[in-house]
Image: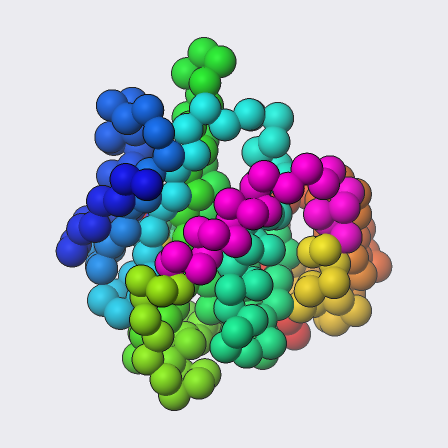
Amino acid sequence: MLKFKLSKVTSTQDFAEAISSMLYEDFLVIAEEQTKARGRYKRAWYSPKGGLWFTYVKKNFNAEEIPVATLKASLAVRESLSSFFDAKIRWPNDVVVNDKKVSGILIEAIYAGDATDLFIGVGINTNVKEFPPDIKATSILLETGKEVNNDELLNNVISKMDYYLTLKEDFEEIVGKINNYLSIKDKKVVITRKDETKVECTALFVDKFGRLVTDCGIFEVEDVLRVESK
Ligand code: BTN
């Protein structure tokens, strides 16, 4: 597969989106450092040297499969990280250990006629030594005391993503797998809506439409900015 390895870039998503129309096969963009990386809803994503920051581009992706692809990407990253610790999924797209975020996934798509390019942006805090005080996150290094080989981990994540993305299971079955690893199951959480209002609920499970079911309502992925454990 084509790989673009950059030492510094604004965002691997930006770079991948800029070159995608010139390429006709799946490719990877990896950066040692990002200066303007983004998370969901354009939030900033802290990406110093040491972490694993990449965008995996799937060309000519079936647009109908995008919702299930985001869940599959989370399953793949969780599974890769489970070789280091008890990694779980915090709905919708975070991978956490002991309630602290260790990885985030951002899926974007560019539609051009029938062909859709899918940009799977993955940030994994591998060898990040410290975080600014306002960021509640951890890294593999901080949790295990060991340096991670980013190239090996990248290969592992990509092979798991390829496995899940070609799996023919439907949305409901994939949601079943997500529920097995849901970090917030039966926990009190504070949900921040897109308009920044907050509500405290007990998270129950993810339903067959991919929504979070709680004791105070059902939440769609698009309506939620953040979910935090109490
Ligand atoms: C989130 O938790 O909101 C998603 C974070 C996604 C971060 C990754 S790092 C590689 C890629 N490039 C970006 O600018 N963002 C994603």
For this rendering, which residue is in front, 85 or 228? 85
Question: Which residue lies at the image location 61% right of the left edge and 62% below the top edge?
Answer: 89
Query: Which quadrant, please, contains the N terminus?
Result: top left
User: Residue 13, position in %: x, y?
Assistant: 33, 42
User: Residue 194, position in %: x, y?
Assistant: 56, 46
Q: Give the residue furthest to the bottom.
A: 145
User: Residue 92, position in %: x, y?
Assistant: 61, 52
Question: Which residue lies at the image location 44% right of the left edge and 51% below the top edge?
Answer: 158
Magenta segment boundaries in residue numbering: 154-176
Image height check: is 70 above or below 197? above
Residue 147 at least partly seen: yes
| Left or right position of 23 against 215 | left
User: Residue 12, position in %: x, y?
Assistant: 29, 46
Question: Which residue lies at the image location 43% right of the left edge and 34% below the top edge?
Answer: 58
Image height check: is 97 above or below 145? above
| Residue 50 lies within the magenta run | no
Image height check: is 185 above or below 133? above
